[in-house]
Amino acid sequence: MIEKRWDLTKVTDRIQLQAIKQRRPLSCTMELTYRCNFRCRMCYVRMTDSQAAPYGRLRTVEEWLDMARQMRDAGVLYLTLTGGECTQYPGFEQLYEQLALMGFRITIMSNAGAYTDSIREVFRRYPPANVDITLYGGSNETYAAVTGDPRGLDKVMENIRFLQSIRVNVGLNFTMIRQNALDYLKVGKLCQGLGIPYTLITDITRHRHNPSFSDALQCRLTPAERACIACHPPEEATLALENAKELEQELKHFQMPKAPAEALPSETDVCIGSMVSSAIYWNGDMESCISMNGYCCAKPFEIGFEAAWAQLKDQFQETFRRPAVCQACSMKNDCLQNCTARRYEGTGSPHEPDPYTCQYTYLLRLYRARHEVTDIPTDPTCA
Ligand code: SF4
Ligand code: SF4
């Protein structure tokens, strides 16, 4: 999320440090579409066309290519293509090929559930630097329950094997909700069989436009379930969920941390991502981070990429200001997921702590201390 160990013998680290020093754009996420082949119950972005209509329109291939040229001229080297499912964007193959020819290092974020022959062909000809794939279960039955696709896992595994056959670097995440928590061990074994480590994600937020567009808040793990899952190995998922019932009771002693009476000096979240990155959404709005949708709403397709970048930079101090309550909080060193964007996703304001995060941190500390757990999974990083 926020910290990174620098290795100055690596050219990539030297490039990143230089961009941070000069506050220049180095990477950008293009969120090509809200559409997706899956219908995950906890999704924060997928919409039908009629749900999406009030928020804007998809950008055309030509518009994205023009934006990419502006980014390249501004110094952007790394592109991440995401969605929805980015490969569902109409014209994906044409856009991807041109971006690859422009020399960007491209990461694809994908569910890997729907690659056509033409998508495979363009990946074969221009292999992406990375494909980061999210898994939703360890069986077709679980995929049906989470994504709505009863053959989901078969399709995903076939596409992962295809990517491995063309020697693409594949990264895996497992997004856990109540409907797939008991697949923890199965997913671990699948990843082991593929020879790819995975990152567990249990932090789920509401749909970004309208909470009623998904069941995210109903199907995510409770803070107690998350804490217990974090402290147990995959083979103990059932025990972890059982223990969560007792841990849940401890919430009666929980109180939201309060802001200190005296004013504190203003601090900002030191977020490497926000200093050199930006995200442009399917409707053309731009933010410093993909999780800040709707906050600054810079308009690069209207004012140009450089001007939109300058606008976000001007608002940086205000946007990434850390709330006094978090600065003074006694749990802050254990609070792993409290970044500006996460607060914004959870509460609609980057300056308010999210109670879901605070409760999780409180219970995780309790459970770790009681069970003397020292080794817990860390969060995904966006550095
Ligand atoms: S695969 Fe991702 S984008 Fe698609 S519905 Fe599931 S969570 Fe949403
Ligand atoms: S988000 Fe974390 S640091 Fe902020 S008040 Fe809650 S527990 Fe404390």
Image (cartoon, rainbow, N blue to C red):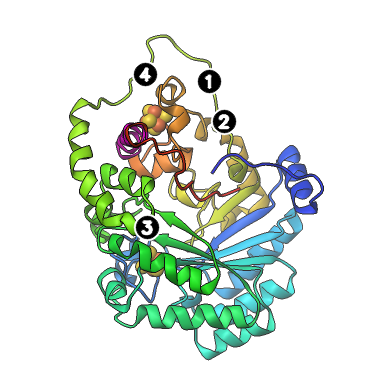
The residue that mark 1 highlights is: 266
In the rendered image, residue 255, in percent from the top left (x then y), is placed at 25, 25
The residue that mark 4 highlights is: 259
Q: Earlier in the sequence, mark 3 or mark 4?
A: 3
Q: Residues within 10 Å of mark 3 (few under 14, many from 20)?
A: some
Q: Quadrant of ligand 1?
A: bottom left
The residue that mark 3 highlights is: 234
What distance separates the C-alpha of mark 3 from that of mark 1?
Answer: 41 Å
Q: Say the numbered circle drawn on residue 317.
A: 2
User: Label 1 amino acid?
Assistant: Ser
Q: Which residues are magenta?
A: 355-368
Q: Secondary structure at mark 2?
A: helix
**Ligand 2 lies under 8 Å from the Cβ of mark 4:** no
What distance separates the C-alpha of mark 2 from that of mark 1?
Answer: 9 Å
Q: Earlier in the sequence, mark 4 or mark 1?
A: 4
- Please determine whether, in this image, residue 189 is positioned above or below residue 309: below
What distance separates the C-alpha of mark 3 from that of mark 4?
Answer: 37 Å
In percent of the image, x 28 and y 42: which residue is there? 223
Position of the N terminus by quadrant: top right
Query: Cβ–Cβ below 8 Å for labels 2 and 1?
Result: yes
